[in-house]
Image (cartoon, rainbow, N blue to C red):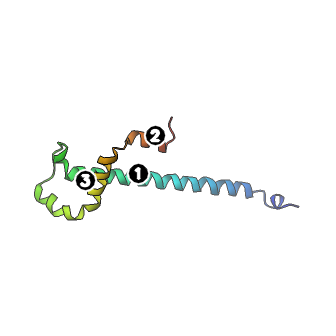
Amino acid sequence: MTDKEKDPLENVRAFLKGFFGAFKQNSTEYLEFELRELENVFALTLMGAFVGIPSPPTTLVIRILPHMTRELYVMQRRAVDMDDVLGELAGMFEIT
């Protein structure tokens, strides 16, 4: 008997392992994308006066500003790159 005849469920196990591995990888990409977008929204909420959105009280923004260095870098990168968010989403979901 060969190895495949000994364990008929080996192909099913291999398939499920590959399926769940791909699922985990895609899930991580979706979460990273959502994190980038939430960081951008947070920065825009606090610095909304630059784009015409009503912003929170100035004293609150000034107290939070030292903790926002990462968000400011993200906002600057987004302004430079000008990513197409809908295009990026379509690419992740493989929409053509």
Q: Which residue is mark 3?
A: 43
Task: Decide: few, some or many residues near mark 3? Use Cα within 10 Å; few <14, some 14-19, many ≥20.
Answer: many
Q: Position of residue 14 (x, y in %)?
A: 69, 57
Q: Which residue is mark 1?
A: 33
Q: Give the CA distance from mark 3 to mark 2.
A: 24 Å
Q: Secondary structure at mark 2?
A: helix
Q: Which residue is mark 2?
A: 90
In depth, the one of 72 and 26 nearer the eye is: 72
Q: Amino acid at mark 2?
A: Ala
Q: Where on the picture, by quarter, is residue 35? A: bottom left
Q: Amino acid at mark 1?
A: Phe
Q: Secondary structure at mark 3?
A: helix
Which residue lies at the image location 53% right of the left edge and 56% below the top edge?
24
Task: Decide: few, some or many residues near mark 1? Use Cα within 10 Å; few <14, some 14-19, many ≥20.
Answer: some
Q: Give the CA distance from mark 3 to mark 1.
A: 16 Å
Using residue 19 as the reference point, say whether residue 33 is left or right of it.
left
Using residue 51 as the reference point, say whether residue 6 is left or right of it.
right
Using residue 65 as the reference point, say whether residue 12 is left or right of it.
right
Q: Position of residue 59 (x, y in %)?
A: 11, 59
Q: Give the CA distance from mark 1 to mark 2.
A: 12 Å
Which residue lies at the image location 64% right of the left edge and 55% below the top edge?
16
